Amino acid sequence: MIMERGQALLLPVSPLFIIVSLVGAVVLSMLLGLAQALWLPDVLAVCIFFWGIHQPRRVGMAIAFILGLWMDVQQSSLMGQHALCYVLLNYFAYNMHRRLLWFPIKEQMIQILPFFILADALGLLIRMSTGDDFPGWSLLLVPFLETMLWPAANFILLAPQRRAHDPDANRPL
Amino acid sequence: MALDSLDRSPPPFFRVGFAPLTKLIFFGTLSLVLMYGDKQLQFTQPIRAGLSTLVMPVQWLVLQPGQAMSYIGKHFQTLAQAQQELETAQRKALSQSASSQQVAQLQIENQSLRQLMGLQNKLASASQVAEVLFDVPDPYNQRIVIDKGSFKDVVLGSPVIDAGGVVGQVTRVYPLSAEVTLLTDRDQSIPVLNSRTGARNITSGDILMGVPSIELKFVPASADVKEGDLLTTSGIDGVYPAGLMVGRISHIERRVDISFARIHAVPLAELKGRHILVLQPTGAQPGAKGKTP
């Protein structure tokens, strides 16, 4: 067991929490979708990438693909557009999951930004190639905002694993 | 500390599944096939309809808190506001009463005249009221989702109108809901009649200076078009009933080097309220076929 010095030992992840977090991300993306703003980040993409980094054996490309199809139906976009982006994100996450967690969080963000840019550019490319108009420049903010969500995702999604392994009266959580 | 409380178990030795690259190629190809199928062959509609029956209830549930809030908000709006709205509505009804009283008589007169002239009777469209659930969050096109689907006899291609005029057309039908593409979507066209000159044209959606509008296509630069002209449906397409308001010409650009004028119109559909009217396509109505003279 090789770990970085000072890194906290985490409790094992609960599969139920992974499901809850993914469902929560889907619901959150529905709510964000109601706002009709171009620049809003895709929280589900961040969530899939996060679990692809932290639990690559639990959240794989099949789950990313199915959630992508769900998003395609929900957003009424081209069938397979989100699916391809999420599968690609999950693949990149798998490829870098051993390396990325050795870096502090800021350096992690620098490393994951290109992949979010790539995934969003792919979505844009797919739609432009099927004859849609360019929707607006604020779309370019999306990958940066998704990267900004990374510390928050780390805080929220790892919180259940940061609890004490032997809770007592003084440490209920 | 028990060992099983640590999340550092080694990966399985033998059952590791497919290589990630294999999976990427498999799912990537599958997505590409789906995309091609969705755009070119339209075979993904059953998959979409099936998935949408799963998605819609969740989406409906997510919408509920917001709707409850707006309902409560409306419930507690002041009495004065309600009275004012009532007064406006009454005044509007009064101003419309004269014309609505004439309509019945005019319809009879029109019918008898048409019979005299041997023309086909103008068909009255069957319609049903539907509620707008939300705007489709896809930034690339302009669509809304309504709460009536194929279970309520909404068919593909149905025209959709509101108090102001034509909203658009039903372009995807699911069992419990349907998608309406607005006239301002670039893929949506509607045949129109300039009510001042009687010229027939086709429009399609366009974005003029950031505002979604509709553009009149293939109008010669010398054509008689003025700003403020009213566009109505021409009724020759077999989809839209004739005489529905579509838009008002707002912007005309005539250039020497292009033989067509660039003409834009503002859609008259209000899209403010939550309710719209879904009409039956005129061509799909019983008795519409085989009667053409």
Image (cartoon, coloured by chain):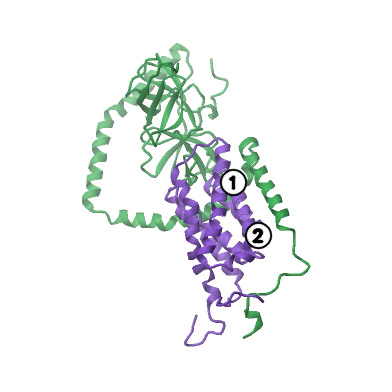
Looking at the rendered structure, the kind of residue marked 2 is Asn
Q: Quadrant of residue B277?
A: top left
Query: In the current view of this chain or complex, which residue is farthest to the right?
Result: B14
Which residue in the protein does label 1 denote? A81
Q: Which of these two is toward me, B50 or A79?
A: A79
Which quadrant: the N terminus of chain A? bottom right
- Measured Cα–Cα span from mark 2 to mark 1: 22 Å
Q: Colour of chain A?
A: purple
Q: Are dots 2 and 1 on a single chain? A: yes
Q: Is residue B117 above or below residue B83?
A: above
- Residue at mark 2: chain: A
Which residue does the image show at 52% across and 59% down from the upper left? Answer: A110
Q: Is residue B185 above or below residue A138?
A: above
Q: Nearer the viewer, mark 2 or mark 1?
A: 2
Secondary structure under tag 2 reads helix
User: Where is residue B204 drawn, in percent x and y?
Assistant: 47, 29
